Image: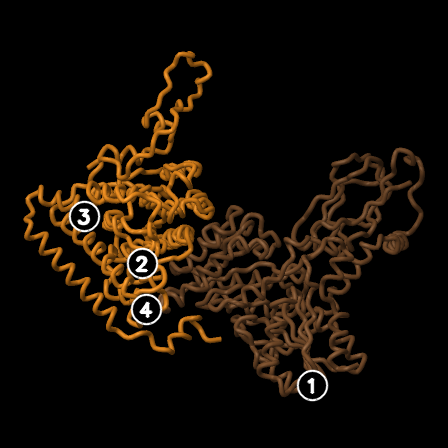
Amino acid sequence: MAIELKMPALSPTMEEGTLAKWLVKAGDEVKSGDILAEIETDKATMEFEAVDEGTIGEILVAEGTEGVKVGTVIATIQGEDDAASPAPAAAPAVEQKAAESDAPAGQDAKAKAAAAIAPKTDAKPAADPELPAGTTMVPTTVREALRDAMAEEMRSDDRVFVMGEEVAEYQGAYKVTQGLLEEFGPQRVIDTPITEYGFAGIGTGAAMGGLRPVIEFMTFNFAMQAIDHIINSAAKTNYMSGGQMRCPIVFRGPNGAASRVGAQHSQNYGPWYASVPGLVVIAPYDSADAKGLLRAAIRSEDPVVFLENELVYGRTFDVPQMDDFVLSIGKARIVRPGKDVTIVSYSIGVGFALEAAEQLAGEGIDAEVIDLRTLRPLDKETVLASLAKTNRLVVAEEGFPVCSIASEIIAICMEEGFDHLDAPVLRVCDEDVPLPYAANLEKAALIDAGKIAAAVRKVCYR
Amino acid sequence: MAKPARPRAARSPAKPAPSANAAAAPVQEPIIASDVAEEAAFALRSLQQAHANNKRYDASDEELLKFYEQMVLIRRFEEKAGQLYGLGLIGGFCHLYIGQEAVAVGLQSALNEGHDSVITGYRDHGHMLAYGIDPKVIMAELTGRGAGISRGKGGSMHMFSTEHKFYGGHGIVGAQVPLGAGLAFAHKYRGDGGVCMAYFGDGAANQGQVYETFNMAALWKLPIIFVVENNGYAMGTAVKRGSAETHFYRRGTAFRIPGMDVNGMDVLEVRQAAEVALEYVRAGNGPVLMELKTYRYRGHSMSDPAKYRSREEVQDMRDNHDPIEGAKAELLKRGVTEEKIKEIDKRIRQVVAESADFAETSPEPDMAELYTDVLVETY
């Protein structure tokens, strides 16, 4: 029987890719380790190696094909036993469909999880009210928006430099710093050894010495090694020095759960940093906010923790084409106006909240969705104004429930919005467990649109 | 006084110096147990050699008088701080620099004040005084007053003067080492020719971030001098109880950072060593690691009864190795009059008395200061 070669997932978050080049053709003998094809993800071009021995039967996806979903059968290999048998007759499309429905439960769950974060929620957020009418919007990935923000600030301010693991020659572990080395050179785009505590401290010292460092953590999970400098050195020095010693630094990188990377690589540190006076904490969702707020963060005189999300990097949103597109820190945004209930969220949770709002609209519930964007200082005015209008509120947060941003929002609603509440505020957070690896358990542990919609129905007594 | 600063620990069982042809050596080869052999195994010793060849700085009388005056200022200031602590006027943690004066004075006298950066840990009063910062605002910070250098919001361990390029004053043991490398990085990035001097103790020398910093500082040839002030005790833990390698100046070897072993109780030896180190760093060769053997007479902090060492040990240091007495003896030997020295002592007592008076009488911070300086900008 022929062995099916499927489009491989070359990173934990890859959902599709481009089949850039075939290095074999039908009839070629291959053995394990031979390179069969080159596959481009949104991050890199990877080589696809053979695992099995045999003869290439048929190439089912031509080279140059874009958007090939992970798991699609792209070619077949004839084993020794069936070397002489003809190539499978089934049309690729049919075979692909079969392959999908035959997929094991785990893969199915993953496909569904992928669907939950798929592009349908991408383009929804309303335009930022601060924009002048008639501004041209350019579709941009969050990844590119972040890079553009850094590049634009580096062009206008010599003091700005980027430092971190694999930010320069490798072009960024998640390709966020792609192209910066080429434009700005190794003096300003600096690869560090794997030494988070050390380079976070060096960056902090450089900021104290008058520079404007942008320190990339490959993920914020690794920043726990460096948290002493973020908090004790960067956040507290201005106060402890009576305002003499500033620390204008940005610590940025992906935060929160990625996909199937297990408990040590899947945590949202938003609540941790947001609890510390002296820090600014930003967690954008879409491309325009990523760009406008990262530029604001780099310009700020204060230390900023800038929390990105790996699963959102590849999503495309409109970014206004403006020379000096900078957003205000500390301002939440109503991304979907509504009158019946308020859903407050941030980062990847905004996508789920918007998806839930669409579902609920079909049931006659008009939900308002607020993207906090900045976690510290928190824009409680926008939240309380919305609560005063809708009288019902749900907080959706991809993170642990205990001592969360959700807890904080609920406390604010109790302290300052009690008279407006028609129902208890509910929080929809991840389960209170270390994030598991198994696809079904992981899915069960994380928030999704369905869980948010269920909570909304509850506060609406529906 | 080229004697070692501290009583030597009993020698460990003798070991031969590592040698490539040790296996081929005759069986009857005597076991070598000298410091010379141990030294030979330490490769990055060119600066140490340069220092050994010319140990003491050739100070003019005027310079030596200045060093003396600065050391006396630190000593009297710290004695006064200890006294105010006892009266309840200073709170929290208060780490005194008494005994270690020659280190900050000798090293910082070689720096370009206001251009080269200095950073240290929580035992920071001496380094500030040695960098010309007004004793009044330091003492007022110790008493938690609005006129303090940090407006009363930092205290003993958290003081800064960006004007003097003194960057603290850091309470987390070892944190100042990467922060110092960041300051050095900024000097190099701007190409301003400045150097950073980053002080830390023998205790901090065991923190992991110190070695992360050594690696990057050497890799990027940052203009930084790492200074280990080895006062013999990490709080209550004697060096030999907490450190597998007690020769701290060798701890840069794995990162190709040259080390220097310096007697920190003689201000002229310290200053000469600084000259050697600075010449190397300013030439763009990257970092130097200096170990300054010194001694603190008081406890780790005001609340430390220092039961982990004998009274005799402390007394021996005071009697036989005191940096101020040493400088004074040198001045007298040079023919500087006793009156002139007494004049300095008197003037310094006056300066310290005034700083204490200022610190006691100036008001506490305005209540509004509680909420200022948390963030620079308004969002």
- Gap between marks 2 and 4, in whole Å? 22 Å
Residue at mark 3 shares a chain with residue at mark 2 = yes
Task: Identify the image quadrant of residue A457.
Answer: bottom right
Residue corresponding to mark 1: A422
Q: Residue B144 has which mark?
A: 4
Q: Amino acid at mark 4?
A: Gly
Pick whichever of labels 3 and 2 is earlier in the sequence: 2
- Gap between marks 1 and 2, in whole Å? 57 Å
Residue corresponding to mark 2: B165
Task: Give me the chain that's orange.
Answer: B
Q: Is residue B251 left or right of residue A67?
A: left
Q: Give the image location of residue A369, x and y in percent.
A: 67, 77
- Give the residue at x 45% y 47%: B207
Q: Amino acid at mark 3?
A: Ile
Q: Amino acid at mark 1?
A: Asp
Pick whichever of labels 4 and 3 is earlier in the sequence: 4
Subunit ID for the residue under disc 4: B
Q: Colour of chain A?
A: brown
Q: Secondary structure at mark 2?
A: loop
Pick whichever of labels 2 and 4 is earlier in the sequence: 4
Q: Give the image location of residue A429, x and y in percent.
A: 68, 67
Task: Identify the image quadrant of residue A146.
Answer: bottom right
Q: Residue B324 has which mark?
A: 3
Q: Which sits in the foreground, A354 or A201?
A: A201
Q: Amino acid at mark 2?
A: Lys
Q: Nearer the viewer, mark 1 or mark 4?
A: 4
Q: Nearer the viewer, mark 1 or mark 2?
A: 1
- Gap between marks 4 and 3, in whole Å? 30 Å
